[in-house]
Image (cartoon, grey):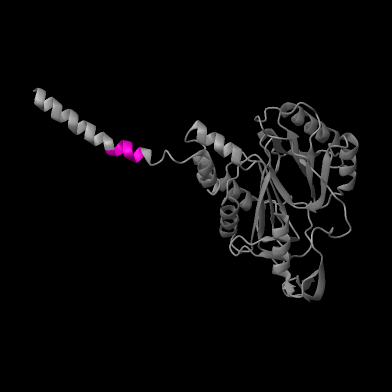
Amino acid sequence: MDGASSSAAAIKTDTKRPQTAAAGLFSPINDDLLHNILSHLPALSFASAACVSKSWNQICSRILTRPKLASALSLHPSPKVAVKEVIEKVLAEPIRPHFVVANIGSGFGLYDISKLISKKLGSSIPFIISTSSGIFGRDALTHEFKEVKWGEVCGDGRDEDCSIPAKDANYGILLTVGFVPGLKVDAIPLLRTIKDPREVLLDKFIMDIKDYTASVSDCTSPVGIMMFGDGLRDMKPIVDALDYAMPTETVIVGDERCRFLYRSENESRNVCGNAKYFTDAVGLIFAKDKDKPHGIGDIQFQIALSNGVSTVGSRHKAVSVKVNNCERSTWLTARKEGHPEILDGQQILDDINNERR
């Protein structure tokens, strides 16, 4: 019995040795190396990695400490394919979506796109989807910059599917996913009663913004407001009223007039198609998070007004400009200051993008 016990103990000891040796292979992976590995994961794998252990979660949190916007464009005529392409692109790197903004062509239905986005990104992320007269961004597949200009978008989006078909359907989507650590984001609508269509509930809109900000922050004024307005609504009086009601530190942008659809994190605010209200506008509200994690700094919004494009970095002098009426785009070549070679539009955009990094 003693000999058998000794043999069994020896076998058990031997079977443990390979496991110990295998475990030892991972011991040299220090935090810096793990940080480098995790920072190259796609968003979904990154989210899973953050749940492995407390130390991994801390490293993932250190990777995502700065604001990030991920954007992609697709001109595929199928809404399912287009949404799939842009979402796969924006989630190709680590990011935790705090909000979503999508600009689409009139050939896509607002409700159809909202369902596809919700299916892929979840039902709790606030979003605003608007029908645009043009989009500009990097193609999800080719990674090249593309610009598409469509016809004017009008109408108030109150038909059955919240979109009005155009004679010449325009297909495409520009999707932007935002990560803003230290801030809370939600969509808040500006309502108008169906009973009295002339009554715009502007005072309620301002109070809703302040109440939401007070609930998530230590103050009643948000740090930023991004406005989207109804196609038939003049946005200037609304923005002026917001400007008067908010402190100078609150950045307010957006005079877009379009058909739009939104979803708020607070279900009580989702009143599109409601029997009592029209939605004249919606604001994407950015408020300081009173419970922000330690080590996260304050995000400062900056805004600049210009009649055209403000000069940043190297100057480019145009060599040729040609309007392509068929594609509703502009073909441009230019020469960078101090360099003899002529660059096409793609090379110019790549050059500018490299300088911004």
Task: Give percent across and percent down for residue 267.
Answer: 66, 35
SS majority, magenta: helix
Q: Is residue 163 visible?
A: yes
Q: Is residue 93 left or right of residue 242?
A: left
In the image shown, does 94 or 155 lie closer to the viewer?
A: 94
Is 21 inside the magenta-drawn segment? yes
Task: Give percent across and percent down for residue 172.
Answer: 66, 61
Q: Is residue 252 above or below residue 163?
A: above
All told, the count of numbered labels is 0
Please provide the residue range marked out in magenta: 18-23
Q: Is residue 194 visible?
A: no
Residue at position x 28%, y 39% from top? 18
Task: Give percent across and percent down for residue 59.
Answer: 55, 37
In the image shown, does 132 or 350 lie closer to the viewer?
A: 350
Q: Is residue 217 above or below residue 170?
A: above
Which quarter of the figure has residue 300?
top right
Q: Is residue 41 left or right of residue 182?
A: left
Q: Residue furthest top?
A: 2
Residue at position x 70%, y 43% from top? 272
In the image shown, does 262 or 232 lie closer to the viewer?
A: 262
Task: Give percent across and percent down for residue 308.
Answer: 86, 60
Which quarter of the figure has residue 287?
top right
What is the quadrant of the C terminus in the image?
A: bottom right
In the image shown, does 2 or 297 lie closer to the viewer?
A: 2
Is 313 inside the magenta-drawn segment? no
